Each structure stands twice: as structure tokens, then as C-alpha cells.
Image (tube, rainbow, N blue to C red):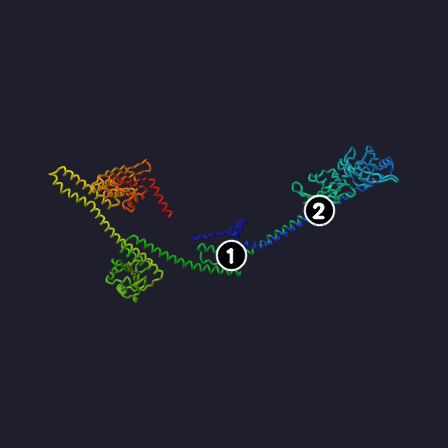
Amino acid sequence: MVKLEQRVVPEQRWAARLGLGSYPRLQTRLVLAALLPALVILAAVVLLTLTAYYRVIESLALERSEALTRLAAEQVALDLVPYMNRLTAATQSPSPAVSPRDQMLALRLAMPELQVFDGGVIIVDSSGHVSATDPRRIEAVGQDWSQLGFVQAYMRREPAPLGTEVAYIGPEGAPAVAVTIITSAQGGEPVLVAGLFRLDVPAYSSAFYRLLLRQREGTDRGVYLVDWRGHLVGEEPLPGYLTGLIPEQASRAAATAGPGAWRLRVPGGDQRVISYAPVPNAAWWLIQDEDWATLSQTGARYGRLLWLLLGIGLVLPGLLVGWQARRLMRPLEELTSAAQAMSQGELGRQIEPPKEWELYQMATSFNQMSAELQALYYGLERRVADRTQELRALHQLATLLGRSLDMCQTLQTALEQMAKVIQWPTGLAYRVAPESGPLQLVASLRIASGPPQSVVPDVGSRNGTTLITCDEAVGRVGEILRAMHWQCAVFVPLATRSERQGLILLGSPVERTLTDEQRSLLEAMARQVAMAADNARLYEQAEAEAVAAERNRLARELHDSVSQTLFSANLLAGVIPTLQDKNPAEAQRRQAELRQLTQGALAEMRTLLLELRPQALLNAPLEDLLGQLVAAVSGRARLAINLEVDPLPDLPDEVRLALYRTVQEGLNNIAKHAGAQQAWVQLRVNDDGSDRAKLRLEIRDDGSGFDPGTVSGAHLGLRMMGERAAAIGAQLAIDSQPGAGTCVKLYWSREQYVAQRDGTAGEELST
């Protein structure tokens, strides 16, 4: 199965970030494409409108608050006029006062009218000293008030203010403010008349406080009076957020000499509107504190209405566009569902074409594609089924052919399988005779009477699988069809690249046809049968050659060893009776030699029998095998061989066989080339009780020896010994000098053998 690489596009990443999945829905994209620009513009317009609206609301609210404060300040000034009139009436009736005594008399007479001034009434002369008071403030006469601001203004001949700054000029130094006028008697200097209002008395007992309370009636705003120095004129304490702002704003107002207003965020998150205005002709500023939420309540309702309209403008078009998109996406969803059903094997799925032209064309194309795909799938299924049947037939044929290497059995199996595949009733199978002779009939299928042996088709008459009818058949093939009463036959030659192997004829008593698929299958089976037949023929040849080679080898072994030994034993047996009377000692020595020869011949025969039975060679103990080998070589070469073998652990079969072959090759070399009188074979074991057994094989003689440097690497015996040692992970060492004998040593350990075996297995696995 081919794995398709999926490439993540930027749209998929953005869709995943927005929570729409790896692949956004087309409906969502259509809605966003249709609504997003309009929604952005609408939102921008609404935000700008709301921003401008709230700014206008704020500006209007501040202007309103400023105007109300200004009107309230003017009302305070108007409320002070009656008090000024009282002061004027007190100093002008019944006649203008000139001297301090006259002034005090006038004030005493006007006490009922001046009672409202709870701090007393004071008259200040042009030097800034108190010249006269009403009876309540007799102690103030003669005091110097020139340091007071309103007195200094009087001394500068400036108009008298309606209200003065806060000063500690009340009874007993209490804080107070004054309402002042400037008056003069006929022919006298102008004097300053001040009516004092105490600020340290309760609000209910002060006419001045009642004046302020009238400004708060019917509202929830705070109203405060401060003088031009920022001192509070009133009883009610200032809120904490205004404590530090009143002096600053009072001084700022004094500098600008005009009303103003600003919005302030107080601790806790609330917003307040602070407005101020100067009281006309007074040293006071009127400050009002109002709640911004109360002022902007009406505007906030309109703002919420705008937000509601914005929400409706966002949601309603989205719903309409989404409904239309859903209506348009329904055919696409049906198409997607049908495609998924097709991917799950439901071929031939059809959908109802919608009324929209583009969607109608798409649905019609999908229906056509579905019908064509179903037809292709069914055709592919038939082809796959046919191909599977062909492969099954080839596999079954290969399995049956692999069970036998007999030529006749191979052709019989091929004939049966070919007839079964194309369902033909009968058939004949021929093979090429040895030495490329004529065809021989070796197998038949459902033939009632024996086929004619005398009528043999020509193997080279046709090439390839061919259907032959009775009317078309000529020559030997025609004779066979008429003899077998066939109306038609299939001619299937069996041939490899090297040569023809045989022929298979499939026949039918009725007219039949042969399809191209059947022809291809028969030719594939014919190639397989031809190779199997060629293998069977080669196996027969190899078997015959192997039998001949084994016979020759046994003949050589018997001639080189047993026959010569028996010939020598025969000579000795003939000489011993003659020597028995003449030289008994020599006869006895010859008898011992005869016994050694017969024992050697017996060992040679046993060794040859073991060689003929490889399984017996593996099952026999290695000590016994080496003993028989030493006895055979010792008897044949008349060589004294000493054998020493330690008790051996359990060894792998290939190790045991390699040790045996190494000793066999070493002893044969000693017997043939060394000219030695004596040889030693030692097999020592160094076993510590674990799986780390170590073996040392040593084959030594006292023969002529040789120079290892002069011996070619292609020497067959030495090369075979080296290959056997390397195969079991052992080390082979050869030590020899001319005239000093030869010593062959082989070292083997189980660890190296296991490591080499595991390494070889790993290499095979990786390969």
C-alpha cells in the first residue's frame, strides 16, 4: 500500500488554531468570506459611532454640569443681596453714621435686622482698624484687620466683595466669612461694613448654611463653597477624593477666572463629575460633585441600544448566510457521504442531482464516475480471481512437482494439472528419449484403451501452445486425433533454453475453444514443467555419476589400503609355516606382524563402512572413531601411533566431524610423506565446569619434516585442514623443520565457536 504524504497548508493551521479542526468546513469559509468584511466594517462604524457618541455625551454632561454650577453660583450671589441690603439699611437709617459712636448707635438700633449675622456686624475704617461693632462684638473694637484680604481690597479702594475668604474673625477667634458693603456718610470717608457668618455652628442655626442647603435641595449632588485660597466654606466635610483637589482647582480657577468641569475616577472604580464656578462679586468658588452614571444614564440607554443593534447586525446576517450556505452545502455533504460509502466498498452509490446548475453538473458527473468505477471494480475482481486461480494452479503444480524427481511422475502430474485447469477430459504426455531420441509415451489421462505406441508426434513440428482441430490436423498429430477420436487437441511443447524435454497433448471429443488467458497459463505451466523435467533428467544423470564416482573411490580405497594390507598378510601367512621349523623366533615375529596387518585391515574396513554411513559417523563416540583411525593407519603404514584422549564434553556435531577429519588428514599425510617411525595424537580438554570448554588437538611425528615457507597455499591437505578449523572458529598452527618432524596444533573454544555462529547468523539476518 502506498502511503501518501499529507502536507499541512496555512489554512489548516489557522483552522486548527480557531478550533475548526485540521480541515475547516466549506460552509464556515463561505460564511466567513461573505460576512467577515461587512462585519468588520459594521463593527468599525459602530465603534466609531459609539466613541463619538460617548464623547458627545461626556461633553454635553460636562457643559451641563458647568452651566448648572455657574447658575448655582449666581444664585448664591443673588441670595447674598438681601443681606447686603440689611447692612445698607442698618448704616443709612435714620441718618448716615459718621462717628464711631453714631455707627455703634445705628447698629444697636438695627439689631433686629442684623440678628441674622451670627458672627456680628463690624465696621472697619480706612486704616484697617475696627471702628464700631454691634453689641455682640464690643471686644473687637480697635482690632487691626488690615492683614485680611477683603480689608486690603477695601483699602485699595476696590469694590467690596459680596462674600469674603475664610478668616478667624468670629467670636473668640472662630472661623467666619463676611458679607461686606462700602458706605460713607455725607462729608465723611467710606467705611467697610461686614456682616459675619460663623462657620463653627450647626447648620440648622445658621442662616448662611441654610443658603447652601437650598442649593442641594432636590438633587443628590454635593455642593461646596471654597474661598480663593482653597479653604472650605461650610460645615459638611469634603469627600476624600476632593480633599487634595479643592485647593489646586481653587487656585487654578482663580487664575483662569472662569467656570469649568472635569470627569474624575475615584478609588473603587466609580466616576464623578466635578464642576466649579466663581460666585459673582465674591471671593468664593462653588464646586459641585455629581455621579457620572446618573448623568450619563440616558446616554447609556442609547449606547446599550446601539450595542443591541450591533449584535443584531452581526447575528442576523450570519444566520441568513449560514442558512443559505447550509442549503447549498447539503448536496456537497450528500456527495461526501456517498464518496465515503464508496471508499468503504459500497460501489455504484448514486445521489439525487439538485436544481442548481453547477451542483447538478457535479452530481451527474459523480453518478457517472460511480457507475464506471463499479464496472471497473467488477472487471478487476474477475481479473484478480482469474489471476489468483492461475497462481494457485501454478503453486499447486510447483508443490506437486517438487515432491518427486522422477521424470515419468513429473509428466503425469503436469498432465493432470493442465487438464484440470482448462477442464479438458483426456490427454497424453511424452518425453524425449535419452540421447535425444524419439518421443516416448510416459503418461496418459482417462484413456479407455491404450494409446497407439507406434504413432508418435514430432517434437519439433510446432512452437508454442496451439489449438488443433481434427480438420486441421495432419501428419502424426492427425493420426493421433483420429485414433483417439478427438475433435480437437491442445499442443503444449515442453522446452527449456537448452533443449526440448517433451510434449503434452490435451484432447476433447467435442469442439472446444482456447482463450488467451488459458493459453498464457498453459505456457507458464509448460515452462515450469519443462524446468522440473530438466531437473529430473539432471538428477538422474547426477545420481548415475555419483554412483560411479563412489564406486571408483571405494575401489581406490580398497586398492590403496585393504588390498595391499591383505596382499602383505597373504605373503606373511605363506612364509610363516616355513620359518616355523627353521627360525621359530622369526616366525613368531612374523606372526605378530601378520596380526598387526589383519587388525589394520579390519580397522580400515570399519572406517570404510563408517564413511559409507555418515549418520553412524556422527553417532559413534569421538574416542572410538579416533581409535579405529589410528589402528587403520598404524596397520597400513606399519607405524607406531600413540593416542591420548581426555574425557570429552558434549560437542556439536560439526566440531566432532572437523576434529575427526583433521586427525584423518594429518595421519594420512604422515603415512604418505613423513617417513616417520612414530607418531603421537593428543586431544586435551581444559574444562572449568562451565560452557567455556577449550580443546587442544596435537598431531606430531618424528619424520623428515618440511619447510612451511616452501609449501604452496594451494596444497590440498593443508588447505582443507585450515578451512575446517576456520569453519568451527578454531586456530590451526603447523610447526615443522626439515629433519625435525612436524607438529600440527588446533585450538578450539566454545566461546569463539558461539561468537562466530551468532555473528554469522546476524550477517545472514541483515542480508
Which one is in front, 113 or 589? 589
Q: Amino acid at mark 2?
A: Leu
Q: Crowding near pointer 2: few (<14 within 10 Å), some, many (20+)?
A: many
The residue identified by callout 1 is 332
Asked whether, in this view, residue 90 is left or right of residue 199, the answer is: right
Name the residue at 70% across, 48% down. 59
Q: Are marks 2 and 1 in contact (CB under 8 Å)?
A: no
Q: In 3D space, how far apart are the residues under numbered discs 2 and 1 (Cα atoms)?
A: 60 Å
Image location (x, y in percent) of residue 327: 54, 56
Type of amino acid at the residue the image marks with label 1 = Leu
Residue 727, position as x, y percentages in the image: 31, 44
Mark sitting on residue 62: 2
Label 1 environment density (alpha carbons within 10 Å; few <14, some 14–19, many ≥20): some
Picture layout, residue 201 above or below residue 307: above
Image quadrant where residue 683 sits: top left
Residue 692 is drawn in which quadrant?
Answer: top left
- The residue most toward the left is 581
